[in-house]
Image (cartoon, grey):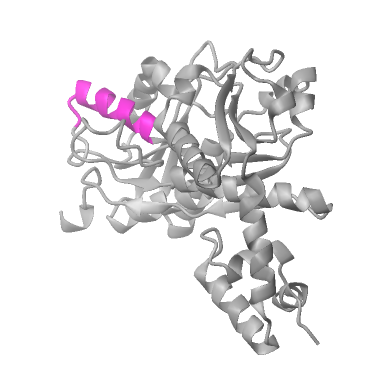
Amino acid sequence: MRVTLKEVAVKADLSVSTACRALNGHPAISQKTAERVKKIAGELRYNRVRDHRRITAVNAALAGCNIAIASLAHDQSLVSMPVIANAFRGAEEALLAAGANSQRINMPDLSQAPRDLNLDCIHGFILVGAMVNEFAAAAETEVVNRLRKFPSVWVIGQPPGAWGDAVVSDDFALGAGAAEQLFAKGHRRLAFLNPMPENLLFLRREDGFCAAARRLGAEVHFFCQSPARGWRLPLQPPTSNFAAVESLVDRMLATEPCPTGVFAAADSIAALAYCAFGMRGIRVGKDISLIAGNNTPELLAVPYPHLATFDIHARKIGALAVRQLALHIAEMSSGTHIAHHLVVQPTFVPGESICNLNTR
């Protein structure tokens, strides 16, 4: 009797789609899981030839389709930030390779559809949305309710009230990795710096940082406060309020004893912290250590020493989102789609912004 992919998935205790990705080298599947699934498939004598035709069909599901790459509840200045721009670029490249047509859309006001968005011609969406709790209420509009009917994949993060699939970074692991890197260099008094505590991605990084620091036995201080006017929708980048970062830096420097290792919620915040420290005669990498996340060289070409950060692989996330959208569309046509949430692991990028207290 012919062994089916479903039998392989059941024995591996995975969904059929996850088992399929594991057998086909999908980059979102860990090497350990892929090896386990391939071993099970070999034991069951599963024949992949027949199912390979299905995978080819899935990859071809986007050919000729019109896909909108849309940002929701974001100010245009935030859409231009390197993380989102790189995710969109990765999606555009993958769509081009799949033979699909792509169109970038910015919808800062969720109650109004952009003039250049013709939903009658759209087959699916790659989405990024404001990662704040206010997004759910703001998305209760007639326009957004129409978007919910389309196959959709969110990139970077999936905001509250979102629909469809998602390909995101493991922000908890990023925060934990930041604490581990600082601790390994001898830092026992740590600080988390964030002028956007409403941002749910940054909150997950804070949770990971706190959990790892306490597990290791380090002392943690939190300097997280929004500017007086708050952060309203459409959301703007943290670089739009240097004064907020300055205030948090001053509070940190006034702490006794002062933290020696600082985790900034994102590279954009770290860039502002560089300026704030420099204006106060504090040398990053000498007098204080700084680490962040996102790996955005476009923002960090000038600050020296080079920032230690984590690459969330934004471009890869965009490309994976396109593959997931193709699978979504193919599965919807057969009535078998189940929403998926893919998580991409961040990678540490060393820099000279962390001083080694173990050698002092």
Q: Give the image location of residue 18, x and y in percent.
A: 66, 64
Task: Tell me the quarter of the image containing the N terminus.
Answer: bottom right
Residue drawn at 43 percent across, 24 percent down: 80
Q: Is residue 202 magenta-colored?
A: no
Total numbered circles: 0
Q: Give the image location of residue 155, x and y in percent.
A: 57, 40
**354 vs 346, nearest the viewer:** 346
Residue drawn at 46 percent across, 49 percent down: 174
Residue stretch in magenta: 267-282
Vertical comparison of 152 with 143: above or below: below
Residue drawn at 69 percent across, 73 percent down: 50
Q: Give the image location of residue 182, x and y in percent.
A: 33, 51
Q: Main secondary structure of the magenta part?
A: helix
Q: Is residue 71 left or right of residue 133?
A: left
Q: Is residue 201 left or right of residue 50?
A: left
**321 vs 84, nearest the viewer:** 321
Is residue 157 visible to the viewer in this orientation of the structure?
no
Q: Is residue 251 left or right of residue 288?
A: right
